[in-house]
Image (cartoon, coloured by chain):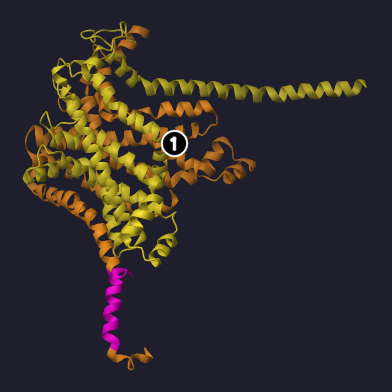
Amino acid sequence: MDSASVVDVGRPAIRRRTLSRSLRGGLKGGEYTWAVAFVVPYIAVFLAFVAYPVVYGLWMGSEASLYRELFADPIYQSTVVNTVLYLALGVNVKMFLALLLSGFFMRPGRWMKVLLLIFVLPWAVPQISTFISIHWMLNGEWGFLNNVLYTLFHVEGPSWLNDRWSALGAVIVSHIWKWTPFWTLILLAGRMAIPLEIRDTAQVDGATGLRGFVYITFPLLANLYLICTLLSTIFLLGDFNAVTFVSGGGPANSTHVLATLGIRNAFEIAHPRLGVAAVMSALPLVIPLVIVLMRKLRTAEVQL
Amino acid sequence: MSTITADARLSSRALTRAHSPVRRRRYLRNAGTLVLSGVIVVWTLAPIYNMVLISLEPEGDVFTDHIWPRVPSVESFWGVLTQGHWYLEHFWHQFANSLYIGAMVTFFALLFGSLTSFAIGRMRIRYGWLVSNAALLTYVIPASFLAIPFYRIMQNYGLANNPWSVIAALVAFATPYAIFVFQEYARSIPIEVDESARIDGASPVQIYLRIYLPLMAPALVAVGTYALLLAWNEYLYQFLLLSSKSSMTVPVALAQFLSSDQSPWNYMMATAIIYALPPVAIYYAFRRRMTAGLTMGGVKG
């Protein structure tokens, strides 16, 4: 600052250079151009195929009258109940099972490894294949499940997909079947990442079994468990395939969730705006979830 | 002497008494493990067994009540492979469509993801955090929620029944994960490697091609597998955007079977199995890399 008067003449040039350099983040001219060229493709994809559809969707669903029509629709009302049940049971039962099973798979031995290979099969097989198979399995007359019930116990099973609650239950169980392996693997990796010294020290101090889990393992896994639960809530909210293929939204449109009702409104009854409105009605849940998740994921990057 | 033997006998009896609850507990534990393993195997394999069972039924024998194939026949698999049913007359074409979309999505997700992560993480471009936040936001928005406006936009562009509309959507949803994992993985590569190359006069393109990509190979494999499987397994966008028989992919064709009441279930299940074989093979081949990728960049289904 003292020498300001001395180099007064050169000052504007220096300032311009520092300004442009600070904009470029310390990169030289040619390098800066390259860096911009490297990010432009993704920014273009983001703007054209994510940002634009988001804005377009918000615009499509911006009329208040749509929501009056939507909320008066009895199918929508049952859809909201289904979505809440699907979220509450699907996410929590699955995550709890994954937490328990990840502990089970920590056991040593070659057989455990083989069992794990079998166990991850539902995740490796495409959704459409397995959900179609489950759909046929639950057929009242010719389905595998009722055939087994009859062969083993001589019980005539019900027509699982012809009743709203058993059909919704089938969807939730299919979701749990399909996704428990994936979250088990994630939590297993989280457990493996706990340093051996911590576990050994805890064992010496008498924290074994349930106490070791309550005082040592779970506190260390809690953050990961919370992130997984939130992420799985978002994924499940957007899940289209389980409902479409297991119950097909039936019987009589009674097992739709918001994601499938949106598509049904838009394409089956050809009212796209009503479809967007159905999806948009989930925003009060989606927005807080997205905000919390974005914060969590940014800080969790280091921990995972 | 006698006192010593008595002592020894006593102590050994005490030992066995102390041991037996331990042994019993271990026995119970093993039995528990065995039962739980059995439950897991049955639970996991039931829908898959059902798929295999029905695909092995000869035609017309699907509507029966037995729980194992009485006369196993590979007739339906043969029917799929030779496109022998009118539902399946474009099977190989549709298979190729799926493969093409998968390959393109993998290529572009890897390309855009690696370029972006290089510019943000290694060249430290200004406002890079804004781009990573945009990616993170995309990652947590359910793709199915954007399907209706996306469909409208593609109709307006005249891209209906064009595989590139699906490729665009899937690249947009796969690249954020790629950026995520690449940035995370790149942290393990010291920045000095880039800097010394820069001092030696290497251009950013040379650093990207000669240093960044080779060192990122494990992450590239993990993300590539992820993107390929994402594209192969995706249904909703392909169903909405590809409706003609020639532009259709396998999952859409598979779902078409369901639309009629008298579906040829044995052909359908054979198709479902053949469609599932490539992802299962890829999954087991790259299993280690994939789980590494999952834990590297957070989590994604």
Q: Is residue B100 left or right of residue A119?
A: left
- Name the image quarter holding residue B106: top left
Q: Is residue B217 above or below residue A248?
A: below
Q: Nearer the viewer, residue B143 or B245?
A: B245
Chain B painted colour = yellow
- Whether residue B217 is visible, yes or no, is yes
- Percent coordinates x, y for residue A82 in the rendering: 23, 33
- Percent coordinates x, y for residue B255 in the rendering: 18, 26
Which residue lies at the image location 17% right of the left edge and 42% below the top edge?
Answer: A279
Specify start and end residues of the magenta stretch as a single range: A10-29
Q: Is residue A19 above or below residue A153?
A: below
Residue A26 in the magenta stretch? The answer is yes
Which residue lies at the image location 9% right of the left edge and 32% below the top edge?
Answer: A268
Judging from the image, what secondary structure is the residue with disc 1 in? Answer: helix
- Name the image quarter holding residue B10: top right
**Which chain does orange denote in the image?**
A
Amino acid type at circle 1 is: Leu
- Percent coordinates x, y for residue B265 in the rendering: 21, 16
Q: Nearer the viewer, residue A241 or A158?
A: A241
Q: Residue furthest right?
A: B1
Label 1 environment density (alpha carbons within 10 Å; few <14, some 14–19, many ≥20): many
Which residue has dot 1 on it?
A99
Residue B11 in the magenta stretch? The answer is no
- Percent coordinates x, y for residue B99 in the rendering: 23, 34
